[in-house]
Amino acid sequence: MGSMPIPTTLARALRAPLLSGSASVRLVVLLVVVALTTGIAATVASASTLPTCRLADTLTAQRSYADWDRTVLDTTYRLTTGYYPGDLRSTANAGLNSGHTVRAFVISDLRAMVRAARAAGARLAVQSAFRSYSTQKSTFAYWSRVSGYSAALKKSARAGHSEHQLGTTVDFRSYGGSAPWYYSDWGTTKAGAWLKKNAWKYGFVMSYPKGKASVTCYSYEPWHYRYMGRSEAANVRASGLTLRQYLWREQTAPAPTPTPTPSEQPSGEPSSPPSAEPSTEPSSPPSEEPITPASAAPAAVEPPAAVEPPAEPSSVPPSEAPPPGSSPTDDAQSEPSPAP
Protein backbone atom coordinates (compact mmCIF):
# COMPACT_ATOMS: atom_id res chain seq x y z
CA MET A 1 0.00 0.00 0.00
CA GLY A 2 1.46 3.44 -0.92
CA SER A 3 1.84 6.23 1.63
CA MET A 4 -1.20 8.46 2.15
CA PRO A 5 -0.58 12.15 1.29
CA ILE A 6 -0.97 14.52 4.22
CA PRO A 7 -4.00 16.81 3.75
CA THR A 8 -3.13 20.46 3.13
CA THR A 9 -4.87 21.62 6.30
CA LEU A 10 -2.90 19.17 8.41
CA ALA A 11 0.35 20.09 6.70
CA ARG A 12 -0.18 23.76 7.49
CA ALA A 13 -0.93 22.92 11.10
CA LEU A 14 2.28 20.93 11.41
CA ARG A 15 4.32 23.80 9.92
CA ALA A 16 2.69 26.42 12.17
CA PRO A 17 4.23 27.46 15.52
CA LEU A 18 3.30 25.02 18.23
CA LEU A 19 0.52 26.01 20.60
CA SER A 20 1.09 25.79 24.28
CA GLY A 21 0.64 22.53 26.15
CA SER A 22 -2.32 20.26 25.56
CA ALA A 23 -4.04 22.68 23.14
CA SER A 24 -1.46 21.88 20.47
CA VAL A 25 -1.91 18.13 20.94
CA ARG A 26 -5.71 18.40 20.78
CA LEU A 27 -5.53 20.44 17.55
CA VAL A 28 -3.29 17.92 15.81
CA VAL A 29 -5.45 14.96 16.92
CA LEU A 30 -8.60 16.72 15.70
CA LEU A 31 -7.11 17.45 12.29
CA VAL A 32 -5.94 13.85 11.90
CA VAL A 33 -9.41 12.51 12.75
CA VAL A 34 -11.06 14.89 10.26
CA ALA A 35 -8.62 13.90 7.52
CA LEU A 36 -9.09 10.17 8.07
CA THR A 37 -12.88 10.43 8.28
CA THR A 38 -13.05 12.43 5.05
CA GLY A 39 -10.82 9.91 3.28
CA ILE A 40 -12.93 6.95 4.41
CA ALA A 41 -16.15 8.64 3.34
CA ALA A 42 -14.71 9.41 -0.09
CA THR A 43 -13.61 5.78 -0.52
CA VAL A 44 -17.09 4.44 0.33
CA ALA A 45 -18.79 6.90 -2.01
CA SER A 46 -16.42 5.95 -4.82
CA ALA A 47 -16.95 2.21 -4.27
CA SER A 48 -20.74 2.52 -4.45
CA THR A 49 -20.83 4.64 -7.63
CA LEU A 50 -22.59 2.82 -10.46
CA PRO A 51 -20.13 2.11 -13.31
CA THR A 52 -20.81 3.56 -16.73
CA CYS A 53 -22.09 1.27 -19.47
CA ARG A 54 -18.76 0.43 -21.09
CA LEU A 55 -17.85 -2.58 -23.18
CA ALA A 56 -15.59 -5.02 -21.37
CA ASP A 57 -15.42 -8.71 -20.42
CA THR A 58 -14.89 -8.66 -16.68
CA LEU A 59 -16.04 -11.68 -14.68
CA THR A 60 -18.80 -10.59 -12.31
CA ALA A 61 -17.97 -10.88 -8.61
CA GLN A 62 -21.03 -12.95 -7.66
CA ARG A 63 -21.03 -15.75 -10.21
CA SER A 64 -21.76 -18.99 -8.33
CA TYR A 65 -25.11 -20.72 -8.79
CA ALA A 66 -26.08 -19.65 -5.27
CA ASP A 67 -25.58 -15.98 -6.21
CA TRP A 68 -28.45 -15.93 -8.70
CA ASP A 69 -30.21 -13.03 -6.89
CA ARG A 70 -27.02 -10.95 -6.48
CA THR A 71 -25.26 -11.33 -9.81
CA VAL A 72 -24.60 -8.12 -11.74
CA LEU A 73 -24.63 -8.62 -15.52
CA ASP A 74 -24.36 -5.77 -18.01
CA THR A 75 -22.15 -4.64 -20.89
CA THR A 76 -19.07 -4.93 -18.65
CA TYR A 77 -19.67 -7.85 -16.27
CA ARG A 78 -20.25 -11.42 -17.38
CA LEU A 79 -20.55 -15.05 -16.33
CA THR A 80 -18.13 -17.82 -17.26
CA THR A 81 -18.56 -19.71 -20.51
CA GLY A 82 -19.39 -22.89 -18.58
CA TYR A 83 -22.10 -21.40 -16.33
CA TYR A 84 -25.00 -23.82 -16.88
CA PRO A 85 -27.40 -24.50 -13.96
CA GLY A 86 -28.07 -28.18 -13.38
CA ASP A 87 -31.60 -27.78 -11.99
CA LEU A 88 -33.40 -26.47 -15.08
CA ARG A 89 -37.07 -27.38 -15.47
CA SER A 90 -39.55 -26.90 -18.31
CA THR A 91 -41.82 -23.85 -18.14
CA ALA A 92 -44.65 -26.30 -18.84
CA ASN A 93 -44.45 -27.11 -15.12
CA ALA A 94 -45.67 -23.58 -14.46
CA GLY A 95 -48.64 -23.88 -16.81
CA LEU A 96 -46.88 -22.20 -19.72
CA ASN A 97 -45.81 -23.38 -23.16
CA SER A 98 -43.00 -25.91 -23.30
CA GLY A 99 -39.69 -25.64 -25.13
CA HIS A 100 -38.15 -23.31 -22.52
CA THR A 101 -36.55 -23.83 -19.11
CA VAL A 102 -35.93 -21.99 -15.84
CA ARG A 103 -34.31 -23.06 -12.59
CA ALA A 104 -36.46 -25.32 -10.44
CA PHE A 105 -37.02 -22.85 -7.59
CA VAL A 106 -38.57 -20.32 -10.02
CA ILE A 107 -41.42 -22.65 -11.01
CA SER A 108 -43.68 -22.18 -7.97
CA ASP A 109 -43.88 -18.38 -8.11
CA LEU A 110 -43.98 -18.42 -11.90
CA ARG A 111 -46.98 -20.76 -11.78
CA ALA A 112 -48.76 -18.53 -9.27
CA MET A 113 -48.17 -15.46 -11.43
CA VAL A 114 -49.35 -17.19 -14.60
CA ARG A 115 -52.58 -18.26 -12.89
CA ALA A 116 -53.22 -14.75 -11.56
CA ALA A 117 -52.60 -13.21 -14.98
CA ARG A 118 -54.96 -15.65 -16.63
CA ALA A 119 -57.66 -14.90 -14.05
CA ALA A 120 -57.25 -11.21 -14.87
CA GLY A 121 -57.66 -11.83 -18.58
CA ALA A 122 -53.97 -11.19 -19.30
CA ARG A 123 -52.86 -14.66 -20.32
CA LEU A 124 -49.10 -15.07 -20.76
CA ALA A 125 -46.76 -17.22 -22.82
CA VAL A 126 -42.97 -17.61 -22.90
CA GLN A 127 -40.92 -16.19 -25.74
CA SER A 128 -37.54 -17.14 -24.29
CA ALA A 129 -36.10 -18.29 -20.96
CA PHE A 130 -32.73 -19.92 -20.15
CA ARG A 131 -30.07 -19.45 -22.81
CA SER A 132 -26.60 -20.96 -22.57
CA TYR A 133 -23.39 -19.12 -23.42
CA SER A 134 -23.25 -20.70 -26.88
CA THR A 135 -26.93 -19.96 -27.59
CA GLN A 136 -26.45 -16.34 -26.59
CA LYS A 137 -23.43 -16.12 -28.85
CA SER A 138 -25.57 -17.19 -31.82
CA THR A 139 -28.39 -14.88 -30.73
CA PHE A 140 -26.16 -11.81 -30.60
CA ALA A 141 -24.56 -12.72 -33.94
CA TYR A 142 -28.02 -12.96 -35.50
CA TRP A 143 -29.11 -9.52 -34.29
CA SER A 144 -25.79 -8.06 -35.36
CA ARG A 145 -26.44 -9.28 -38.90
CA VAL A 146 -30.01 -8.02 -38.85
CA SER A 147 -29.50 -4.64 -37.17
CA GLY A 148 -25.78 -3.99 -37.26
CA TYR A 149 -23.30 -4.37 -34.41
CA SER A 150 -23.93 -0.97 -32.75
CA ALA A 151 -27.71 -1.40 -32.74
CA ALA A 152 -27.43 -4.98 -31.49
CA LEU A 153 -25.42 -3.82 -28.47
CA LYS A 154 -28.42 -1.76 -27.30
CA LYS A 155 -30.97 -4.56 -27.45
CA SER A 156 -29.02 -7.80 -27.13
CA ALA A 157 -26.27 -8.99 -24.80
CA ARG A 158 -22.99 -10.46 -25.89
CA ALA A 159 -22.37 -14.04 -24.80
CA GLY A 160 -21.78 -14.30 -21.06
CA HIS A 161 -23.42 -10.93 -20.34
CA SER A 162 -27.03 -12.13 -20.61
CA GLU A 163 -29.34 -12.47 -17.60
CA HIS A 164 -30.93 -15.39 -19.43
CA GLN A 165 -27.84 -17.49 -18.72
CA LEU A 166 -28.73 -17.36 -15.01
CA GLY A 167 -31.79 -19.52 -15.67
CA THR A 168 -33.97 -17.08 -13.70
CA THR A 169 -35.04 -14.74 -16.51
CA VAL A 170 -38.04 -14.95 -18.82
CA ASP A 171 -39.08 -13.03 -21.92
CA PHE A 172 -42.88 -13.05 -21.95
CA ARG A 173 -45.38 -12.50 -24.74
CA SER A 174 -49.14 -12.41 -24.98
CA TYR A 175 -50.75 -15.84 -25.30
CA GLY A 176 -51.41 -16.45 -28.99
CA GLY A 177 -49.51 -13.30 -29.94
CA SER A 178 -46.29 -12.70 -31.79
CA ALA A 179 -42.87 -11.82 -30.38
CA PRO A 180 -43.22 -8.82 -28.06
CA TRP A 181 -40.65 -6.64 -29.85
CA TYR A 182 -42.93 -6.47 -32.90
CA TYR A 183 -45.29 -4.15 -31.03
CA SER A 184 -44.82 -0.40 -30.76
CA ASP A 185 -44.88 -0.94 -26.97
CA TRP A 186 -45.76 -4.40 -25.69
CA GLY A 187 -45.90 -2.89 -22.21
CA THR A 188 -49.22 -1.26 -23.10
CA THR A 189 -50.89 -4.54 -24.08
CA LYS A 190 -53.11 -6.22 -21.52
CA ALA A 191 -50.48 -8.83 -20.65
CA GLY A 192 -47.63 -6.31 -20.59
CA ALA A 193 -49.52 -3.80 -18.44
CA TRP A 194 -50.57 -6.51 -15.98
CA LEU A 195 -46.98 -7.69 -15.58
CA LYS A 196 -45.68 -4.17 -15.00
CA LYS A 197 -48.20 -3.69 -12.19
CA ASN A 198 -48.14 -7.11 -10.58
CA ALA A 199 -44.97 -9.10 -11.42
CA TRP A 200 -43.10 -7.90 -8.32
CA LYS A 201 -45.73 -9.54 -6.10
CA TYR A 202 -44.54 -12.91 -7.43
CA GLY A 203 -40.82 -12.16 -7.31
CA PHE A 204 -40.19 -10.84 -10.84
CA VAL A 205 -38.55 -7.52 -11.73
CA MET A 206 -38.45 -5.76 -15.12
CA SER A 207 -34.73 -5.41 -15.79
CA TYR A 208 -34.90 -2.71 -18.47
CA PRO A 209 -37.67 -0.16 -17.80
CA LYS A 210 -38.50 2.75 -20.12
CA GLY A 211 -36.23 5.78 -20.11
CA LYS A 212 -33.45 4.12 -18.09
CA ALA A 213 -31.05 2.92 -20.81
CA SER A 214 -28.25 5.14 -19.48
CA VAL A 215 -28.19 3.16 -16.23
CA THR A 216 -29.42 -0.28 -17.36
CA CYS A 217 -27.15 -0.30 -20.45
CA TYR A 218 -29.92 -1.69 -22.67
CA SER A 219 -33.01 -0.26 -24.35
CA TYR A 220 -36.53 -0.56 -22.94
CA GLU A 221 -37.80 -4.17 -22.79
CA PRO A 222 -41.21 -4.49 -21.12
CA TRP A 223 -41.18 -8.27 -21.68
CA HIS A 224 -37.88 -9.07 -19.91
CA TYR A 225 -38.32 -10.09 -16.25
CA ARG A 226 -35.73 -11.50 -13.88
CA TYR A 227 -36.78 -13.56 -10.87
CA MET A 228 -35.44 -12.20 -7.56
CA GLY A 229 -37.76 -13.91 -5.07
CA ARG A 230 -40.80 -12.14 -3.59
CA SER A 231 -39.07 -10.47 -0.67
CA GLU A 232 -36.19 -9.10 -2.74
CA ALA A 233 -38.46 -8.00 -5.59
CA ALA A 234 -40.47 -5.98 -3.06
CA ASN A 235 -37.23 -4.39 -1.86
CA VAL A 236 -36.25 -3.44 -5.41
CA ARG A 237 -39.64 -1.86 -6.00
CA ALA A 238 -39.53 0.07 -2.72
CA SER A 239 -36.03 1.39 -3.53
CA GLY A 240 -37.21 3.14 -6.69
CA LEU A 241 -34.01 1.96 -8.40
CA THR A 242 -33.52 -0.08 -11.55
CA LEU A 243 -32.41 -3.65 -10.92
CA ARG A 244 -28.83 -2.90 -12.00
CA GLN A 245 -28.62 0.08 -9.64
CA TYR A 246 -30.09 -1.95 -6.80
CA LEU A 247 -27.75 -4.90 -7.27
CA TRP A 248 -24.70 -2.66 -7.50
CA ARG A 249 -25.69 -0.83 -4.33
CA GLU A 250 -26.19 -4.13 -2.50
CA GLN A 251 -22.76 -5.37 -3.60
CA THR A 252 -20.83 -2.25 -2.63
CA ALA A 253 -22.64 -0.97 0.47
CA PRO A 254 -20.88 -1.73 3.78
CA ALA A 255 -22.39 -4.78 5.46
CA PRO A 256 -24.54 -3.82 8.48
CA THR A 257 -23.51 -5.14 11.87
CA PRO A 258 -26.09 -7.74 12.98
CA THR A 259 -27.54 -7.34 16.46
CA PRO A 260 -29.56 -10.52 17.06
CA THR A 261 -31.22 -11.33 20.35
CA PRO A 262 -32.03 -14.80 21.70
CA SER A 263 -35.75 -14.21 21.18
CA GLU A 264 -35.45 -13.31 17.51
CA GLN A 265 -36.68 -15.77 14.96
CA PRO A 266 -36.16 -15.46 11.19
CA SER A 267 -39.28 -14.21 9.43
CA GLY A 268 -40.81 -16.35 6.72
CA GLU A 269 -40.81 -15.37 3.07
CA PRO A 270 -43.47 -16.10 0.45
CA SER A 271 -40.96 -18.06 -1.57
CA SER A 272 -38.00 -20.14 -0.45
CA PRO A 273 -35.41 -20.69 -3.20
CA PRO A 274 -32.47 -22.85 -2.19
CA SER A 275 -29.21 -21.16 -1.27
CA ALA A 276 -26.94 -24.04 -2.19
CA GLU A 277 -25.61 -24.67 -5.65
CA PRO A 278 -27.23 -27.44 -7.71
CA SER A 279 -25.52 -30.76 -7.30
CA THR A 280 -24.97 -31.34 -10.98
CA GLU A 281 -23.29 -29.37 -13.72
CA PRO A 282 -22.62 -30.08 -17.37
CA SER A 283 -20.17 -32.94 -17.67
CA SER A 284 -17.89 -31.02 -20.05
CA PRO A 285 -18.42 -27.25 -19.85
CA PRO A 286 -16.48 -25.13 -22.35
CA SER A 287 -13.15 -23.86 -21.15
CA GLU A 288 -12.95 -20.30 -19.85
CA GLU A 289 -11.98 -17.63 -22.36
CA PRO A 290 -9.40 -14.94 -21.53
CA ILE A 291 -10.74 -11.67 -20.14
CA THR A 292 -10.55 -8.74 -22.53
CA PRO A 293 -9.07 -5.59 -20.92
CA ALA A 294 -11.65 -2.86 -20.38
CA SER A 295 -9.84 -0.54 -22.77
CA ALA A 296 -9.78 -2.99 -25.64
CA ALA A 297 -12.18 -2.63 -28.53
CA PRO A 298 -15.06 -5.12 -28.64
CA ALA A 299 -14.28 -8.31 -30.43
CA ALA A 300 -15.73 -8.97 -33.82
CA VAL A 301 -18.96 -10.90 -33.87
CA GLU A 302 -18.60 -14.56 -34.70
CA PRO A 303 -21.59 -15.65 -36.77
CA PRO A 304 -22.95 -19.13 -36.04
CA ALA A 305 -21.58 -21.78 -38.30
CA ALA A 306 -24.72 -23.69 -39.16
CA VAL A 307 -27.89 -22.13 -37.79
CA GLU A 308 -29.44 -19.35 -39.82
CA PRO A 309 -32.51 -17.88 -38.08
CA PRO A 310 -35.44 -16.90 -40.29
CA ALA A 311 -35.64 -13.39 -41.66
CA GLU A 312 -37.23 -10.67 -39.59
CA PRO A 313 -40.78 -9.63 -40.57
CA SER A 314 -40.93 -6.42 -42.57
CA SER A 315 -43.28 -4.46 -40.33
CA VAL A 316 -44.03 -3.84 -36.67
CA PRO A 317 -47.71 -3.90 -35.70
CA PRO A 318 -48.81 -0.86 -33.67
CA SER A 319 -51.32 -2.67 -31.50
CA GLU A 320 -51.69 -5.87 -29.52
CA ALA A 321 -52.85 -7.83 -32.56
CA PRO A 322 -50.12 -9.98 -34.16
CA PRO A 323 -48.79 -9.08 -37.62
CA PRO A 324 -51.20 -9.83 -40.50
CA GLY A 325 -50.87 -13.35 -41.74
CA SER A 326 -48.97 -14.61 -38.72
CA SER A 327 -50.26 -17.45 -36.60
CA PRO A 328 -47.64 -18.23 -33.95
CA THR A 329 -48.10 -21.27 -31.81
CA ASP A 330 -47.46 -21.34 -28.10
CA ASP A 331 -44.67 -23.88 -28.45
CA ALA A 332 -42.74 -22.16 -31.22
CA GLN A 333 -40.22 -19.35 -31.29
CA SER A 334 -39.76 -17.77 -34.71
CA GLU A 335 -36.37 -16.16 -34.06
CA PRO A 336 -33.82 -15.53 -31.33
CA SER A 337 -34.95 -13.19 -28.60
CA PRO A 338 -32.94 -9.96 -28.59
CA ALA A 339 -33.44 -9.45 -24.87
CA PRO A 340 -30.28 -9.27 -22.77
Image (tube, helix red, strand yellow):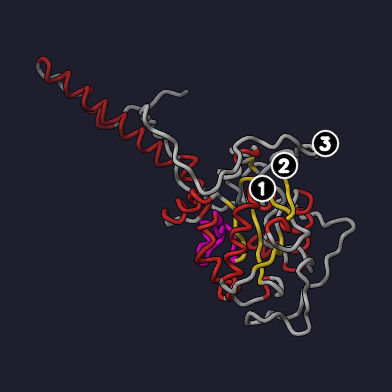
Contact? badges 2 and 1 (CB < 8 Å): yes
Give coordinates of residue 250: x percent, y percent: 47, 43
- The front one of 40 and 12 is 40
Q: Residue, x 78% and y 84% (percent of image)?
A: 325
Q: Is residue 204 left or right of residue 27?
A: right
Query: Tag 3, which secondary structure?
Result: loop
Q: Residue, x 75% and y 69% (percent of image)?
A: 330
The residue tagged 2 is 83
Label 2: how many residues lie within 10 Å, few (<14), some (14-19) or many (20+)?
many
Q: Compared to 57, does 192 lie above or below?
A: below
Magenta-colored span:
203-222
Give coordinates of residue 137: x percent, y percent: 76, 53
The earlier-in-sequence mark between 2 and 1 is 2
Indicate which disc residue 166 carries: 1
Farthest top residue? 21
Query: Tag 2, which secondary structure?
Result: loop
Alpha-carbon span between mark 2 and mark 1 = 8 Å
The earlier-in-sequence mark between 3 and 1 is 1
Alpha-carbon span between mark 2 and mark 3 = 12 Å
